[in-house]
Amino acid sequence: MREMNDIRHGFDCIGVSVTFFCYDGSGRFVMAQRGPNCRDEHYRWCIGSGGVELGEGIWDAVHREVLEEYGAPAKQITSLGFRDVHRDDGSHWVSFDFAVHVDGNAVINAEPEKLLDVGWFTFETMPANLHSQLSNFMTRYASLLKDYV
């Protein structure tokens, strides 16, 4: 029997994650460039996400992950829905997706050991080299996201 520390979420069991579209209320949203110490998708730009910890509630996970990645507390969190994510690497995740209002002046790169850069963008100024799952997220929630930026 495998020890809990040996289980690879998304591969040995379905991974549960939260994905968050953080916006400042003035037409911008934040994205981060993943570094070489991230689990995957190195050097690609993404919106925030993270795994839900054992025993943790989904809403608690969003609050924790936004603080961990961007150093800013969530002012308001809105559930967008969920996605059943089957990735090209063979992993399987269920992602609970959110729009999160944050103070644009408070956002920093709070995980410099994982993230190379953090920046503010609009739909027209998004960088190249995007995370493989970002298109799915943006397409699925396109009509809702326009209400936040």
Image (cartoon, helix red, strand yellow):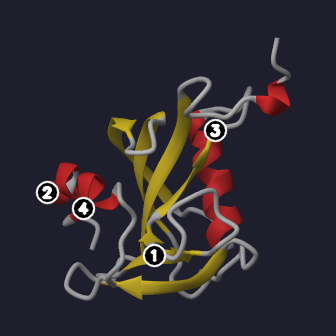
Taking 140 as reference, is 118 above or below it? below
* Circle 2/circle 4 CB separation < 8 Å: yes
Q: Quarter of the image containing the N terminus? A: top right
| Label 1 neighbour load within 10 Å: few <14, some 14-19, many 20+ | many
Residue labelled with disc 1: 31
SS at mark 3 in the image? loop
Q: Quadrant of residue 35?
A: bottom right
Question: Residue at the location (63% across, 44% down)?
Answer: 61
Q: Is residue 36 above or below residue 87?
A: below
Query: Which residue lies under the disc numbered 3?
Result: 52
Q: Mark 2 sits on what residue? A: 143
Sequence-first tag of 3 and 2: 3
Q: Earlier in the sequence, mark 3 or mark 4?
A: 3
- Determine the residue positioned at 17% across, 58% down: 142
Residue 145 disc label: 4
Q: Quadrant of the C terminus?
A: bottom left
Alpha-carbon span between mark 4 and mark 1: 14 Å
Assess disc 4: are there few (<14), some (14-19) or many (≥20) residues with their C-alpha within 10 Å of its C-alpha.
Answer: some
Where is residue 135, by image quadrant? bottom left
How many badges with numbers are in the image? 4
Q: Residue furthest left?
A: 143
Which residue sits furthest top? 1
**Eye-nearest disc, 4 or 1:** 1
Q: Secondary structure at mark 4?
A: helix
